[in-house]
Image: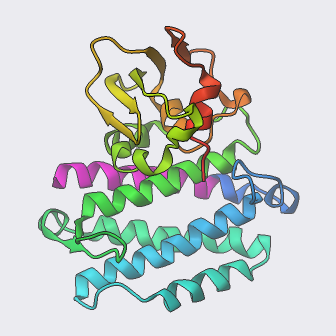
Amino acid sequence: MSERADQIIAALRSGHDHLASLVRGLDAVDLTRKSGAAEWDVSQVLGHLGSGAEIALAVLEGALDGTGPKDADFNKSVWARWDAMSPGERAERFGPADEALVTRYESLDAQTREDLRINLGFLPMPVDVATVAGLRLSELTFHTWDVEVAFDPAAVLASAATGPLLDQVGMLVGRLGKTDALDSRPVRLAIRATAPEKSFGLHLDEAVALGEEPAEPDAVLSAPAEWWLRLTTGRHAPAYTPTSATLTAGALTLDDLRRVFPGF
């Protein structure tokens, strides 16, 4: 498990360095441009990432020193402080806040990466470093896309993050998917992802779940892995969908899948 934590922490570093570099080149107009997140401008995305980094660092420190997670009032105070910042302040402070979190993860030795268990407060039991860092990687990666797509409609998720996120998407897909979008008709899809290559099944019935690729699927989705990940989080508008994302067999359409995964 330490090897997975190593991979995720390395992806956090490369993701941080990339976004911090991008942010340094943004001016006041850029920061108030509409982002890929429907209700936020670019600066608000950075504020969300900055406040999230502060909260995540506090959670990690609480696990390391035995004091446990902060309470809801702590989180609310962090969010309020970042919400009150100007667009320029959010851009200026995002980098140091996220750097502090990534550096702390990098400081963990191999034994700690393997053995530490972290109480997130909203899961039934404490989880390991790889799981917690993976959740942060998901947040950082998708919101980096939200920033980039404001300037480039062909933006894609970071390649260093795509593999780790592909491995963990099953944790969240049941909460993200809405089967009532298909009038509750059961559908079994084969998902054939590329870059990296991975095949599996998506089962749409009373719930949404991943599993083994069905032998006789109702439809086959072939797509870059990064677009499959964006699909599950609602970042799938036709303008942001590559021509290599195709759905065959006729049981449903890409627009059906977009309704199953409306985003959040």
Residue in view at x 50 percent, y 39 percent: 179
Q: Looking at the magenta stretch, what is its main secondary structure?
A: helix
Left or right, residue 238 beside residue 110: right
Left or right, residue 130 beside residue 177: left
Q: Quadrant of residue 44?
A: bottom right
Instruction: Where is residue 78? Give x, y as percent.
Output: 58, 84
Q: Is residue 241 visible?
A: yes
Instruction: Where is residue 150? Give x, y as percent.
Output: 75, 45
Q: Is residue 14 magenta?
A: yes
Q: Quadrant of residue 47?
A: bottom right
Left or right, residue 93 beside residue 164: right
The residue lying toward the viewer, choosing from 67 and 222, is 222
Q: Quadrant of the C terminus?
A: bottom right
State the residue lying farthest toward the top: 249
123 vs 71: above or below: above
Left or right, residue 74 beside residue 68: right
Q: Is residue 157 visible?
A: no
Instruction: Where is residue 54? Give x, y as percent.
Output: 49, 78
Instruction: Where is residue 98? Give x, y as percent.
Output: 51, 68
Which stretch appears magenta? 1-21
124 vs 211: above or below: below
State the residue lying farthest toward the right: 29
